[in-house]
Amino acid sequence: MKQKLTIIIAVCLFITLVFQPCSVKKAEAAVSLTSTKTAVKHTKTPVSKHGRLKVKGTKLVDKNGKAVQLQGVSSHGINWDVGEPFVNEAALKTLRDKWGANCFRVAMYTEDYNGYCVTDAANRKKLLKTIDIAVKAGKKLGMYVIIDWHVLNDQTPKKYQKAAKAFFKTVSKKYKSYNHVLYEICNEPNGSATWSAIKSYAKAIIPVIRKNSKTAIIIVGTPNWSQDVDVASKSPLKGYSNIMYAVHFYAATHKDSYRQKLQTAIKNKLPVICTEFSACEASGNGAYDFTSAKKWINMLKKNKIGYVCWSLSNKPESASLLKPSCKRTGGFTNSDLSKMGKWLISVY
Ligand code: IDC
């Protein structure tokens, strides 16, 4: 009997010693690659869980009226070869399952390098195809997809308003039966683009989308590279539903005074969403300021404001979530991630 007990204890000890370090290692790997618990165990996809999103008061809410926080990743410009290749189902699946993202933003520049408004018909078709790949992948994977009309060099969205109307007519018609598509109608108005000019543009575009989709979320950029949400909050658009306003930040450049603008917008009850951010400088390069970035993220989490990180690319610049050496376009592993990429998934 005593001998039997000794054997049992010895076997138990053996099992513990051999298998425990192994399971600990596995758990560590899971933690370093996946940050949220839900990211590991999807019983339902984000879209099957939340359904069509709505704006209620200042918040984005789901089909049951419960607040939802979007956590997303933005493509780099799909008109660049450092952006387009990463827009595919395998990449989005990794973002959903390993990173904990529930949203993908497909960024299409309007004027910069081969952008939609300055390129030829063949390339425009290719850009629409890339958007379609993102939308279809999002549908299959149950992830929200933001279609972003990426105003930047063009400064004022009024410049290509006619093209924007045609574009949003096309995409809102094409995707009218999909409940996972959101429209961002002007990434970052800047230069002399005033809030009243942006509002006039929004008033031209919103009805075009509403003709096809009565309820899709429409995100409006704000002056000064989508920083002046305080200005927008003093004079929001009237008479429309499911409208949100964009705030963007690059944490090494935009600190307390910019967070203050967001605080003002929150106080004034503006429905805000952060559709672009990074921990680096506004140039997309330079050093990271993770302390400032954490302050932003804490503020966003506290107020349940969604956030989308720039960008899914291996371009050698600080904002890229992948290392320049990453040759994969999907199925990214931990070693493919840049310092920014690793930080991001630790925050989700
Ligand atoms: C940057 C890209 C960079 C590209 C440049 C083009 O990271 O590779 O050459 O655009 O002008 C924004 C813009 C976003 C910028 C990003 C970083 O929305 O297009 O991307 N940024 O500069 N606003 C603030 C920063």
Image: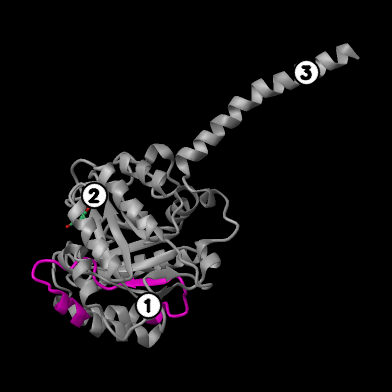
- x, y (%) of residue 241? 36, 81
Query: Relative to the observer, which residue lies in front, 217 or 110?
Result: 217
Q: For the magenta stretch, what is the residue range?
A: 173-201
* In contact (CB < 8 Å): disc 1 and disc 3: no
Determine the CA span between mark 2 and mark 1: 28 Å
Query: Relative to the observer, which residue lies in front, 118 or 256?
Result: 256
In the image, 98: left or right of 193? right
- Which residue position is annotated with label 3? 9
Residue 242, label in figure: 1
Determine the CA span between mark 3 and mark 2: 56 Å
Can you see residue 19?
A: yes
Residue at horizontal 47 percent and vertical 74 percent from the top: 179
In the orientation shown, which residue stands out farthest toward the top?
Answer: 3
Neighbours of disc 1 within 10 Å: few (<14), some (14-19), many (20+): some
In the image, 73: left or right of 35? left
- x, y (%) of residue 43? 60, 57
* In contact (CB < 8 Å): disc 2 and disc 1: no
Residue at horizontal 49 percent and vertical 70 percent from the top: 62
Q: Is mark 1 within 8 Å of ligand 1?
A: no
Query: Relative to the observer, which residue lies in front, 50 or 119?
Result: 50
Residue at horizontal 34 percent and vertical 52 percent from the top: 297
N-term mark: 3 or 2: 3
Neighbours of disc 2 within 10 Å: few (<14), some (14-19), many (20+): many
Residue 251, label in figure: 2
